[in-house]
Amino acid sequence: MALQVTTIMLAVEDMERSKKFYVALGAKLAQDFPNFASFDLDGGSALGIYPTAHAAKDAGVSPEGTGFRGVSFHHIVATPEEVDEVITTALDAGGAIVKPAASAGWGGYFAYLADPDGHLWKIAASA
């Protein structure tokens, strides 16, 4: 058996706010229930959102957690201009800049942003 990621699930505080954020970034809403929504992503994978309390109960863990979660998602685009476009779209949709866009020592250009629930996204271009 080969490991694969078919769906990434994020716990969120406000379902409507998160749906608007991910649709604004180009995710296609596939399922929309009161306590779960899923989005089809390019490449065949999916993103799911679930209210934090429900997600914690489903996993049998406490819903509390703060600070860096040890995970970030990376969206790679073709140009630095596209990085800036994604950042602008994310800000307009309720995201926040965590690390402003800048040239990188490895020759690329990247920034970190947070979705409305603080999940980290690195937006990067290699040239």
Image: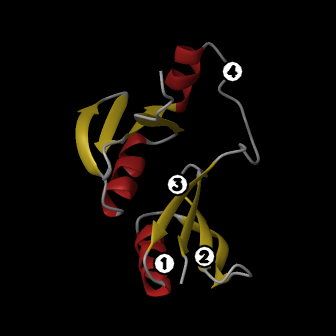
Amino acid of disc 4: Ser
C-alpha gap between disc 4 and disc 1: 35 Å
Kindly identify the residue that appears in the image at 71 percent across and 43 percent down.
Answer: 69
- Circle nearer the viewer, 4 or 2: 2
Mark 3 vs mark 2: in front: 2
Which sits in the foreground, 37 or 102? 102
Q: Amino acid at mark 2?
A: Phe
Work out whether mark 4 precedes mark 2 in sequence or the reverse, and give the earlier one.
4
**Circle 1 sits on which residue?**
83
The mark that comes first in sequence, 4 or 1, is: 4
Disc 4 or disc 1, which is closer to the eye? 1
Residue 10 or residue 96, whichever sits in front: 10
User: Which numbered disc covers residue 11?
Assistant: none
CB contact under 8 Å: marks 4 and 2: no
Measure how far apart labels 3 and 2 are at the Cα level: 20 Å
Residue 116: mark? 3
Horizontal and vertical percent position of residue 13: 52, 40
Q: Is residue 29 left or right of residue 76?
A: left
Within 10 Å of the Cα at label 2, are there few (<14), some (14-19), or many (20+) other Cα atoms? Answer: many
Estimate how packed mark 3 is, as few (under 14), some (14 to 19) or many (20 or more) residues with alpha carbons within 10 Å.
many
Q: Nearer the viewer, residue 42 or 4?
A: 4
Q: Which residue has dot 2 on it?
A: 110
Residue beneath disc 4: 62
Tell me the distance, in whole angstroms, between the alpha carbons under discs 1 and 3.
Answer: 19 Å
Depicted 47 relative to depicted 109: above or below: above
Q: Amino acid at mark 1?
A: Val
